[in-house]
Image: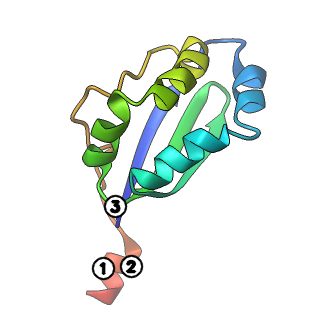
Amino acid sequence: MQRILTRTRLRAGSEAAYERVHASVPPELAARLRRAGVRDWTIWRDGQDLVHLVEVEDYRAMRKALADDPVNAEWQAVVNPLLEADDDYSGSDDGLPRVWSLADQVDA
């Protein structure tokens, strides 16, 4: 299981709309995320900055599986206008680089 941290940024003034659409994502999308190996996806917001913690079997495989998925495309059409930069799922990113972990140091 991978724990991936990513961040995105909202367009100014779209904070309330973003929270509104995330009050409950469509059940079809939640099912597609689960099928793509996502165990959990948590989002925090600090002003316009969003931080995502994704717990997933294989992050790159998940993004590849969702890149052409019509349910995900429909969701991105709702969410991307609220963000400063679109996410088209075409990248090969691995999230933010991890610097340190207390558990890794103490339990090693």
Task: Residue under label 2, please give it.
Answer: 103
Tell me which corner region of the image, top left, top right, bottom left or bottom right, holds residue 92. top left
Q: Residue furthest left?
A: 92
Comparing 108 with 91, the one in front is 91
- 34 is higher (above) or lower (below) than 43: below
Horizontally, residue 40 falls left or right of residue 60, namely: right
Mark 1 Cα shell of 10 Å, populated few (<14), some (14-19), many (≥20): few
Q: Are marks 1 and 3 in contact (CB under 8 Å)?
A: no
Between the C-alphas of marks 2 and 3, the distance is: 20 Å
Mark 2 Cα shell of 10 Å, populated few (<14), some (14-19), many (≥20): few
Task: Residue under label 3, please give it.
Answer: 57
- Give how far across and how far down residue 79 sits, in percent: 58, 22
Residue type highlighted by circle 2: Ala
Task: Residue under label 1, please give it.
Answer: 105
Between the C-alphas of marks 1 and 3, the distance is: 23 Å
Residue drawn at x 30%, y 79% as measured from the top left: 105
- 8 is higher (above) or lower (below) than 45: above
Q: Are marks 2 and 1 in contact (CB under 8 Å)?
A: yes
Q: Which comes sooner in the sequence, label 2 or label 3?
A: 3
- Give how far across and how far down residue 34 sits, in percent: 48, 54
- Give how far across and how far down residue 52 sits, in percent: 51, 44
Residue type highlighted by circle 3: Glu
Residue type highlighted by circle 1: Gln
Residue drawn at x 57%, y 11% as measured from the top left: 81
Quadrant showing the N terminus = bottom left
Horizontally, residue 20 falls left or right of residue 27, namely: right
Q: Which comes sooner in the sequence, label 1 or label 3?
A: 3
- Give how far across and how far down residue 65 sits, in percent: 32, 40
